[in-house]
Amino acid sequence: MKVLKTSILAVVFWGLSMGVVADPDKPRVFQASPVISTADGVEVGAAWLKRSKNRVDGRIMTTVDTAGIPYTVWWVIFNNPAACSDPCGMDDVGNEAAKVAFLNASGAISAAGGLDGRGVINFDFSIIGREGASVGSQVPPPPAVDAPHWNRVLKKNNARCAEIHLDLNVHANPPLPVNWVGELTYPRPPGNTESFAVFKPAPGCHRTLQKLDW
């Protein structure tokens, strides 16, 4: 009986230790945000993120102006939000201290079925800290664009503490035949962001940001 009890305790401790090793990033932080139209500031959908120490998973569900055309959603990641305005904005993109990164999250074709004859679109996406173009999390920047935010990524172990914006870009009325690869993986010029969602850093991030090596 003593041997049996010892064996059971050994299995229990092994299971607990394996659980810690298997998911060291717990607890995961869930955040939700409205999706806001850039045209009139009206709420048109919702988005959520699940953050761990080094990974972010997300989903955006929203109505869009037009069905049947390409849309892309982009991560706009302010790795050091303490260095920018509150909340961070496009005026902070050129702020070197904010360590901004632009990365492609996903692309899709809008479907019919939205309110008042509008389209609908749903995206699922994820990102892991310190991934880059070489491993497929970021498409190359547009031709002739050379800016730091195209060459940065989500900083390792900063997934809970970055301020994250999701920008939904519309690719309206592309010329026929449609270059679907280009339309679904490259951003449109400024002014084509149809809607966006903003996620502030998770609670308790001030100390983490101070410790990171910028």
Image (cartoon, rainbow, N blue to C red):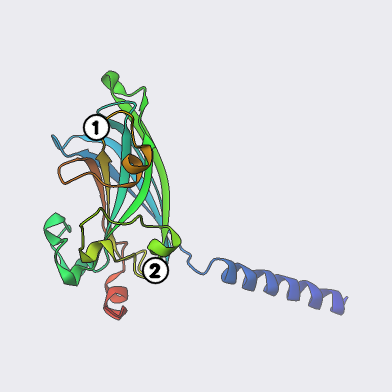
Residue 170 seen by the camera: yes
Indicate the amino acid at tag 1: Ala
Indicate the amino acid at tag 2: Arg
Q: Quadrant of the N terminus?
A: bottom right
Of residues 34 and 55, which is closer to you in this image?
Answer: 55
Nearest to the eye among marks 2 and 1: give it: 1
Indicate the secondary structure of the residue bearing disc 2.
loop
Q: Position of residue 189 (x, y in %)?
A: 18, 45
Query: Is 23 positioned to the left or the right of 45 in the image?
Result: right
Pointer 2 local density, CA inside 10 Å: few below 14, some 14–19, many at least 20: some
CA distance separating discs 2 and 1: 32 Å
Q: Is residue 54 above or below residue 119?
A: below
Total numbered circles: 2
Query: Is 167 positioned to the left or the right of 88 in the image?
Result: right
Residue placed furthest toward the right: 1
Q: Which tag, 2 or 1, sits closer to the chain's start?
A: 2
Residue 172, numbered circle: 1
Q: Position of residue 192 (x, y in %)?
A: 19, 40
Circles 2 and 1 in contact, beta carbons < 8 Å? no
State which quadrant residue 39 falls in.
Answer: top left
Q: Position of residue 187 (x, y in %)?
A: 26, 47
State which quadrant residue 90 falls in.
Answer: bottom left
Q: Residue at x 26, y 19 (%)?
A: 116
Of residues 82 and 38, which is closer to you in this image?
Answer: 38
Q: Quadrant of the C terminus?
A: bottom left
Residue 29 seen by the camera: no
Residue placed furthest toward the top: 117
Q: Position of residue 8 (x, y in %)?
A: 78, 71
Q: Is residue 33 above or below residue 117?
A: below
Q: Residue at x 14, y 64 (%)?
A: 94
* Residue hosting label 2: 130
